[in-house]
Amino acid sequence: MHDPARRTITELAAALGSGELKPSEVIDACLAQADACESDVRAWAHLGADNARMAARLLDQISSTGPLYGVPFGIKDIIETSDMPTGYGTPIYHHHQPARDAACVALLREASGVCLGKTVTTELAHFHPGKTRNPHGLTHTPGGSSSGSAAAVAACMVPVALGTQTTGSVLRPASYCGVYGFKPSFGDVSRSGVMECVSSFDTVGWFTRSVADVEIVRQALVRIPFVPLQKPATTSLRVGLFRGPDWAEAEDYTKELLEGAASKLAKAGANVSDVASPDGFGDIATHHRTIAGYEFARAITWERTQRAPLLSPKLVDGRCADGLASTYEQYAEAQSALVRQRAQYAQMMEAYDVLLTPSAPGEAWSGLGATGVPTFNTAWTALHVPALSAPAFSGPSGMPVGLQLVGKFRQDAALLGAAETVCAALDVEIVRGV
Amino acid sequence: MHDPARRTITELAAALGSGELKPSEVIDACLAQADACESDVRAWAHLGADNARMAARLLDQISSTGPLYGVPFGIKDIIETSDMPTGYGTPIYHHHQPARDAACVALLREASGVCLGKTVTTELAHFHPGKTRNPHGLTHTPGGSSSGSAAAVAACMVPVALGTQTTGSVLRPASYCGVYGFKPSFGDVSRSGVMECVSSFDTVGWFTRSVADVEIVRQALVRIPFVPLQKPATTSLRVGLFRGPDWAEAEDYTKELLEGAASKLAKAGANVSDVASPDGFGDIATHHRTIAGYEFARAITWERTQRAPLLSPKLVDGRCADGLASTYEQYAEAQSALVRQRAQYAQMMEAYDVLLTPSAPGEAWSGLGATGVPTFNTAWTALHVPALSAPAFSGPSGMPVGLQLVGKFRQDAALLGAAETVCAALDVEIVRGV
C-alpha cells in the first residue's frame, strides 16, 4: 500500500509529518486516481486541480502545521467555496461563484487541508439524482444526496469529503458506497455557507475510510484540540440491537448480517441486548416529513417563485407542495413531539453506549434514476444524535451494506470510540478502495 | 395625514385596495421622504430607487394580489438580495452581489411587497457601528445592529424594514428610534440567505409603526394565511411586571415609566402582578455569551483566517477570541442550561399572558461611537420567545424609550393580540414619524 491516494488521513499525517511524503505528492496521487476513475464514477461537479496543486506547493514550503496538513478533501456542491463554483445540483446556479468559503471549508483549510473540488449533489440536496455512479457497481446508485462525496472517498480520489444530511443523505450513500459516513450531533458543526434546506435538521457530515479519520476531521470541524479516541474494552460495552419500527423494510440478508454482528459482539464479551422502540418512535418519520416540507418550501422561496421552471417536478409537486399544505399548528405540534422524543431517547440511552441498526434496507439500488430511501436514517436525524455508518458487510450481489451505530447527543467522541471497539471486534477494516 | 410615506401598512392596504393610491405613488412618496431626510439619518447602505420604481410600475398594472401589495420595505444589509448588493457592514464585502434573494426577502416579494433598499448594519451584525444616526436626535446612536432598519422606519422612509436579532439587535434600536420592533419565536422565519452569526439565536425580526403591521408582516414571513389579531379584553389580561436581575441597570426614569404603565394597566382592569425571576435566570446572559462567542468564531472562520486585517479589533479581540477560548464542554453545558431555562420559563408563563419589562436601560446613548447595550434583550433571545418593543415612553431628553412585551414560545399571535390591548390601554399610538 504505497499509493498515497489509498492511505487514510492518519497514515498520511504520519508520512507527511516525517517528510516521507510532501503535500504536492499526495495531491498528485489523488489527482492521478481521479484521472483513472472519474470517467466511470463521475463524482465531481468541479475538480479544482490547479488550485489544489498551488495550495499543496505552498504547503510543501512549510513544515506540518494544522492537523490536516496536506490532506486533500472534497466538498459537496451545496457548500460555498471562494475559489470554485457552487452549483447546488441545479441549472439555476450553473457557474455560480460564491464570495467566501463556508465555515466548514474554511475550518478544513485552517487545519491545513487542501480542497480538491466540489462533489456532485442531487438537486438542492433532494431526490433528483446527479451524474454519479457507484464505484462498486457502475449501474448502481451511489445513494444521495451526498452522492459524489461518498463515491469520491470510495474510489480513493480523496481520503475525506464533506456532505450534508437532512434526512439520510450521508448515512445512506456511505452504506451504498462502502465507506465510513458520519453525521455528528446537530449543531456541532457550523452551517454558515451551507445551503439551508431544513434548518431544524441540516447537519454537515463526512465520509472517510477509517473511524480514526472520522474523528480527526470532526475535531477540525468542531474546532477543538486534537485528542485521540478513547476505545472502551469490548467487555465494558453496552450494545443495544435496535430493530425498530421499520425492521420489516430491511432485506432478509440485512437482518441476518445485523443479527450476526450482534451475536459476534456478544461472543466477544460485549453486553448486547435487544432494545424496544420507545413510545411514539414510529411517528418520528412523520414529524420529520411535516417539518422538512414546511421549512424547505419556505427556505427556497426565491427558487420556487422566481426559477420554478428550472426545478424538477418531483421537488415542486412533492416536498414543496407538501410543505405549503402543512399548517403552522401541524408544524409546531411536530416540533413539540420531537422535543419529547429526544428526552425519551436520552432516558432510554442511559442503559446503552451504542445502538446497532441497519444503515439502509440493503445494497444500493440498481439503476441511476433514484438514490434509494432514508428509511433507517430519518429518526436519528430528527433526534439530533450522532450516527456512523461502518462498511461492515456486503450483500448478495457483492455490493456494500453498512452497519449503523448510533450514540448520544453531544457525545460524539464516545460514539466513535465505541465504534472503534465494535469495528475491531467485527473485523471491519480500513477501506482501501474498490 | 395624506402623505403615503407616513401611513401604516394597514392604511396603505386599504388605499391600494380601493384604488385611492397606486403602488408607484407609494414608492414615490417613500423615495421623496428618503430624499428629504437620508442625508441626516443615513439609514441606507444601498437605496434601490430604480429597481423599486420598476417593480411598483409592474404592480400598477395588476390589481391587489398579495397581502403586502405595493408596500415598500427595507432589508438589513446582512440579508441577501438578488438585485442589490449585500455588504454585511464590512469592507470585506464591498460591492458584493448575491445570486438570490434570502427567503425572507423572497417571501415579502411573494406577498407583493417592493424592496426599496438595503439598510445599514453594524460590522457583521456586531458592535462596530455604521453611519446611521437616530432620527430623534442626530447626535444619538440609533442602536444596533439593525441600525438602518429602525431609523428608516422611524423616519418614514419605509413602513417596514427587516432586521435580525442575535442578542438585542432589533429590540434595542426599536426602543431608541421610537418604533415597534419585533423578534418572533426562534425558528418561525427562515434564515436562508441571512448571514449566520450564531445559529442557536439568530432570528429575523422587523420594525413597523403599528402593532397590526407587525402581525401582517409576520404572517407574510411565516407564510401563513392572513387572520386578523384577536385582541383580548383588558380585564382578561394576566400581566407580569418583570423587573428581573438587571433591574439596577435601568435608569430611574425607565423604572418609573415601566411601573407607571403597570399601574395604569391595573387601573384599566388588567390583572397585573410582580414576577420573580426564575432560578438561574440571572445566568442566562452568561450562557448566551458563551454560546454566541463559540458559534460566531466558527461561523466566520473564512473572514477570521482570510480577511483578518479588514475586521475591527473589537470583533477579533472580543467575541472571536472569547469564542475560541471556550471549550466544547463549556459550550455544551451552556446549551443544556438554556434548555432547562426554557422549560422553566414555559412553566412560569402558565400564569401570565404577557410580561412587561424594559426594552433598554433608557434613552439612546449620546454619540455615534457605540450602539448601546442589550441588557434587557439577551435573555428573551436565549429563551427563543417572542418579544415586542412598543414606543410607549419618552425620557428626560425627549428621546424615545420602549416598553418590552414578552410572550410564550410559538404563541406570537397571542403576544401581539395582547400587545394591541396593552398599547390601547396605555395610549401608545401609531407612529407618524419624527
Image (cartoon, coloured by chain):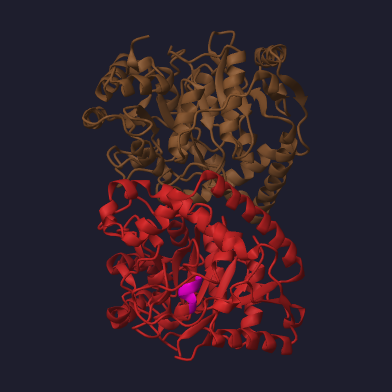
Chain colours: A red, B brown
Is residue B15 or residue A256 the one in the foreground? B15
Question: Residue A30: x and y, percent?
Answer: 36, 77
Q: What is the quadrant of the N terminus of chain A in the image?
A: bottom left
Is residue B104 or residue A195 the one in the foreground? B104
Question: Residue B390: x and y, percent?
Answer: 55, 21
Question: Residue A401: x and y, percent?
Answer: 51, 83
* Residue A158 visible at all: no
Tell me which corner region of the image, top left, top right, bottom left or bottom right, holds residue B234: top right
Please indicate whether residue B111 sits to the left or right of residue A398 in the image: left
Picture layout, residue B14 above or below residue B112: above
Tell me which corner region of the image, top left, top right, bottom left or bottom right, holds residue B151: top left
Q: What is the quadrant of the C terminus of chain A in the image?
A: bottom left
Tell me which corner region of the image, top left, top right, bottom left or bottom right, holds residue B29: top left
Residue that appears at 61% across and 74% down: A405
Residue that appears at 46% across and 13% down: B136
Is residue B191 magenta-colored? no
Picture layout, residue B389 above or below residue B267: below
Question: Residue B388: x and y, percent?
Answer: 57, 27
Residue that appears at 69% across and 39% down: B284
Is residue B412 or residue B41 the one in the foreground? B412
Is residue A57 or residue A289 the one in the foreground? A289
- Kindly report the secondary structure that dominates the magenta region of the rendered protein: helix
Picture layout, residue B391 above or below residue B305: above
* Residue A87 visible at all: yes
Residue range corresponding to the magenta coloring: A171-175
